[in-house]
Amino acid sequence: MSSSYDRIGVNYAELRKPDPRIAARVGAALGPARTVLNVGAGTGSYEPADRQVTAVEPSTEMVRQRPPSAAKVVRARAEALPFHDGAFDASMAILTVHHWSNKATGLREMRRVTRDRIVILTYDPSFRGFWLADYIPGLTALDEAQMPRMTDYEAWLGPVDFSPVPIPHDCRDGFLSAYWRRPAAYLDPRIRAAMSSFWVLGDVSEALSRLERDLDIGAWAQRYAELPSDYPPVMHSDSAHLLAVLPDRSH
Ligand SMILES: C[S@@+](CC[C@H](N)C(=O)[O-])C[C@H]1O[C@@H](n2cnc3c(N)ncnc32)[C@H](O)[C@@H]1O
């Protein structure tokens, strides 16, 4: 089974460690579930240690980086989950749905194998507050192209409970917007390599040179002086969302 993450996932485990504050939100959203399916599980981030977890992951490279303590992993894709109907109490998909080739089919598969709630952590592509897009406008187009709209989830799954997830300024998980108050991090190619967007965007050297210059002369600090300085900043409160989808028990 080949997967883009065999190429872009090298060093993933080093830079993409679960952030404990976000992990607590995921754990709470899973509610009382005892058996949990983690789809697009990657290296095992956010897998709750206090439940019986089964992971699904297509990439050999990502599976290779799973620690020995991580949940047992099944090599499969969201679009064809090898489990019987209602096999799990709950399921989770963390920062992965935008990578699926058929999002509607993958989410319907999650619904099929899940008795109770589905928990999804994703971004709202309509959010326009991230300063990095001022330097790299292609980020906005990329989000719009690959991220489902919030309304898509309801169309595919039925009623969804949306809740914003603040991204801490010292977020431990190195995803794209994690360094929103540490702008120099985006100048580091090692850090960028753990962000799939930079693999898709191609050459952004001119934009990064502008960012570097603005940091040097203080223009960045002046322009974004309104960024909050204390935790918990909610600059991205509209950007990252935790979705909890409860089963429709009306029939
Ligand atoms: C950004 S990583 C997220 C991994 C993990 N959930 C985390 O939070 O660190 C996205 C993951 O989705 C996986 N993926 C891509 N396409 C998939 C698909 N069709 N079905 C299931 N997983 C997929 C990738 O291989 C990769 O491991």
Image (cartoon, rainbow, N blue to C red):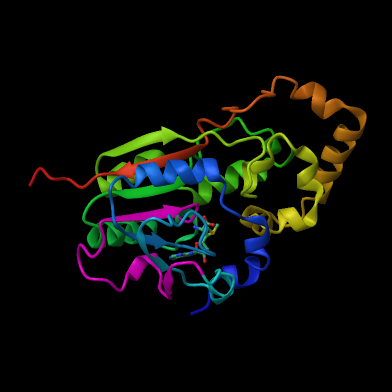
The residue at 72%/54% (across/down) is 192
Residue 186 drawn at (x, y percent):
76, 46
Magenta segment, prevailing SS (helix, strand or loop): loop
Is residue 193 shown left or right of residue 36?
right
Q: Quadrant of residue 9?
A: bottom right
User: Which stretch did the figure color magenta?
Assistant: 69-96
Q: Report the residue that reaches farthest toward the right.
A: 217
Residue 15 drawn at (x, y percent):
67, 56
The residue at 50%/31% (across/down) is 238
Residue 226 visible: yes
The residue at 86%/34% (across/down) is 215
Magenta-colored stretch includes residue 84: yes
Is residue 94 shown left or right of residue 17?
left
The front one of 227 and 69 is 69
The front one of 107 and 16 is 16
The mark total stands at 0
Residue 128 drawn at (x, y percent):
58, 32
Is residue 59 shown left or right of residue 168?
left
Q: Report the residue that reaches farthest toward the top.
A: 226
Residue 29 drawn at (x, y percent):
36, 43
Q: Report the residue that reaches farthest toward the left.
A: 251
Judge whether 238 appears above or below 123 on screen.
above
The residue at 79%/56% (across/down) is 189
Magenta-colored stretch includes residue 108: no
Is residue 83 shown left or right of residue 229?
left
